[in-house]
Image: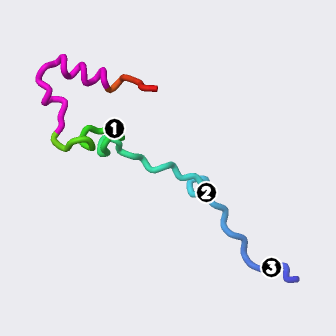
Amino acid sequence: MAKNRGQRPAPRSSAELIRPPEQVDYDQQTPKFCLRHLHPDFDVRSLRDESKRADFAMALQIVRT
């Protein structure tokens, strides 16, 4: 057998081996729950009475089992 079959590969630096995950800009994405998916023209600000806004927010918090 030949003593010198080839060259050893150059060792990799730790920066090459570990890549951080890509940063996601969540400010540019639509939330998972979005009223836009229910009706394109719906906006909570269209509820002029603040008690209706509060009722809507409370309805979202109700957990049904």
What is the residue that sits farthest to the bottom in this orientation? 1
Q: How is the image coloured?
A: rainbow
Nearer-the-camera pick, 54 or 13: 54
Residue visible at 58% across and 52% down in the picture: 18
Check disc 2 and report its element: helix, strand or loop: loop
Q: Determine the CA span between mark 1 and mark 3.
A: 63 Å
Check disc 3 and report its element: helix, strand or loop: loop
Instruction: Decide: few, some or many residues near mark 3? Use Cα within 10 Å; few <14, some 14-19, many ≥20.
Output: few
Quickly name the residue at label 2. Answer: 13
Residue visible at 25% across and 24% down in the picture: 56
Circle nearer the N terminus (1, 3) = 3
Name the dominant secondary structure of the magenta segment. Answer: helix
Residue flagged by tag 1: what amino acid is it? Phe
Residue visible at 51% across and 49% down in the picture: 20
Residue flagged by tag 2: what amino acid is it? Ser
Expressed as whole percent of the image width and height from the top left, the position of residue 62 reads 37, 23
